[in-house]
Image: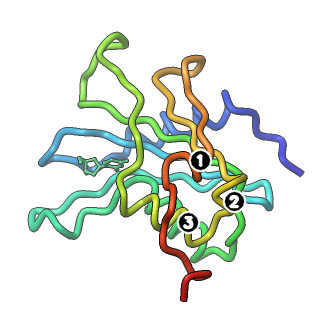
Amino acid sequence: MIIMDDKELIREAYKVQAYSYSPYSGFQVGAALLGRNGRVYTGCNIENASYSPTNCAERTAFFKAVSEGEKEFVKIVIVGNKKGASEEERDYCAPCGVCRQVMAEFCNPKEFQVLLAKSETDYRTYRLEELFPFGFSKEDL
Ligand code: THU
């Protein structure tokens, strides 16, 4: 049963954003992913001195979930801003192309919801198919 409402999920994303390891960009991202099983998997971005090993918050959340046995998902909340940004400076943080590809691996693009939040009450909801049209997936193989 799904008991998480959007506001609670946004709160989870903000909580984990605080763990962002982003000394190079100073851009802190948090994600909260709701599994079909009702569990929430959170993730932050984790950077690296060699730059390319950097993992986005969304993929951290997905990889945690899959490695803990969940492969079906309902929605994800993403929050992201420069460290120390004021409320006014915050904007909607859209997922990068690589993260959209990972979402498409596990989620039905017509159903999976991507919520981009600026605050607990100010957020936009998209279907994955809007953010990732004409993507490559296992059906193409
Ligand atoms: N980042 C994410 O974690 N998710 C996004 O959706 C956009 C970008 C991270 C990667 C890097 O650590 C920092 O934000 C700047 O690109």
Q: Residues within 10 Å of mark 3 (few under 14, many from 20)?
A: some
As drawn, which residue projects farthest toward the right? 1
Question: Where is mark 3, residue-wise?
Answer: 104
Which color scheme is applied? Answer: rainbow
In the image, the residue with mark 1 has its CB under 8 Å from the nearest atom of ligand 1:
no
| 126 relative to 49, above or below | above
Give the alpha-carbon distance from disc 3 to disc 2, as whole Å: 11 Å
Q: Amino acid at mark 3?
A: Ala
Q: Amino acid at mark 2?
A: Phe
x%, y% of residue 34?
68, 51
Give residue 66's quadrant in the image.
Answer: bottom right
Q: Amino acid at mark 1?
A: Ile
Disc 2 element: strand
x%, y% of residue 44?
40, 51
| 13 relative to 51, above or below | above
| 38 relative to 55, above or below | above
As drawn, which residue projects farthest toward the top? 88
Give the alpha-carbon distance from disc 1 to disc 2, as whole Å: 8 Å
Q: Quadrant of the C terminus?
A: bottom right
**Tag shown at residue 73:** 2
Whether residues under marks 1 and 2 lie with C-beta atoms below 8 angstroms apart, the answer is yes
Closer mark to the observer between disc 1 and disc 3: 3
Closer mark to the observer between disc 3 and disc 2: 3
Question: Where is mark 1, residue-wise?
Answer: 76
